[in-house]
Amino acid sequence: MNIDNENVLAVRPTKTIFRDGDTVVKLFNKSYSKADVLNEALNQARVEETGLNIPRVLEVMTIDGCWAFRSDFIHGHTLQQLMEQNPDKFDYYLDMFVDLQLDMHSRTCPLLNKLKDKMHGKIEKSDLDATTRYELHTRIEAMPKHNKVLHGDFVPSNIIISENGMPYILDWSHAVQGNGAADAAYSYLMFCLSGRKEVGDKYLKLYCRKSDTAMQYVQKWMPIVAASQSIKHIESEKALLYRWINVVEYE
C-alpha cells in the first residue's frame, strides 16, 4: 500500500498513523506484536462502551503483511496545540483537561486489564535492583484498589477538540482499570519530563482540588509510575526518573 505523505499524521518508531478519507489508520511495523495491536484495538472498543467521547474502532486488518486498525478521523486540534496557540486561555484548557480526566475516572470497564498487574510486570522488567523492586511491589499492594477507567498516557496531545468544540480522547494502547491517582501521577510525570514542571505543578493542584484528593496520595504513586516509565530506557529521562524512584528508600 502506498501512503501519500500528505496524509501522514504521525510517524513513531513502531508505527505510522495516516488519514484515509474520514478515517485514521494506525499501521504497525512488521516486528510489532500482533497481540499488542489486537489488545489496543480491543481496549479502544471496550472503552467506547463506557460512553466516553473517543474515536470508534471500525476495522482491524493487515496491510502488506503489517497489522493495522482503522478508527474515526476527528477534525480539529489537539488540546496541546490550543494551549500553545492561545496562551491567554491556558487556564481554561487546563481546567478542561482535568475535567475530562475526572469524567474518565468516573467510568468503569470491568474487562480492561488491571493497573496493579501492569505495574508489577513493568517493575520486573526494569533495571532496578532487587531491593528497590521489592519496595515498589510492596507499595503497589498497599495502595487502595479501585476499578476506574485509566488512560495510562493522559496528556494534552492525546485530546482532540473537534470543530464543534467536542473533546475526544485518543490513543488507548495503555488503558487499564485501577486507581485514578496513578493516572494523575503519570500525567504529572509527563509534564515534568517535557520540561514543563510549573505546568505539572499547576495541573496537580487543580486535579487534587477538583477530585478532593490529597496531593500526598498522588505522590505515593510517583515512584511506581517513574519505574514503569524507566523501562523505555530514554537517556534524557533517566536522571529525573531515578530521583523519583529513589524516594522509596527514604520513606
Image: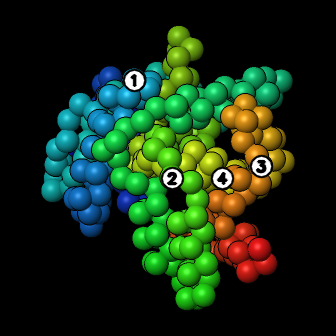
Image coordinates of residue 38 in percent, x first then y, are 24, 50
Identify the secondary structure beneath mark 4.
helix
Quarter of the image with the C terminus is bottom right
How dense is the environment of label 1, judged by Cα within 10 Å: few (below 14), some, or many (20 and up)?
few
Residue 185 marker: 4
CA gap, disc 2 and disc 3: 18 Å
CA gap, disc 2 and disc 4: 16 Å
Q: Total number of numbered labels? A: 4
CA gap, disc 3 and disc 4: 10 Å
- Reading the image, the residue beneath label 3 is 215
CA gap, disc 1 and disc 4: 24 Å
Q: Looking at numbered disc 2 in the image, what kind of residue is underneath it?
A: Lys
CA gap, disc 1 and disc 3: 29 Å
Q: Mark 3 or mark 4, which is nearer to you?
A: 3
Disc 2 and disc 4 in contact, CB within 8 angstroms: no
Q: Mark 1 or mark 2, which is nearer to you?
A: 2
Q: Looking at the picture, does residue 217 appear above or below residue 137?
A: above
Q: Looking at numbered disc 1 in the image, what kind of residue is underneath it?
A: Gly
Image coordinates of residue 213 in percent, x first then y, are 72, 42
For marks 1 and 3 on the same chain, the one whose residue lies earlier in the sequence = 1
Image coordinates of residue 214 in percent, x first then y, are 76, 46
For marks 3 and 4 on the same chain, the one whose residue lies earlier in the sequence = 4
For marks 2 and 4 on the same chain, the one whose residue lies earlier in the sequence = 2
- Reading the image, the residue beneath label 2 is 145
Q: Is residue 80 left or right of residue 28?
A: right
Disc 1 and disc 4 in contact, CB within 8 angstroms: no
Q: Residue at x 29, y 36 (%)?
A: 45
Q: Residue at x 48, y 41 (%)?
A: 148
- Reading the image, the residue beneath label 1 is 51
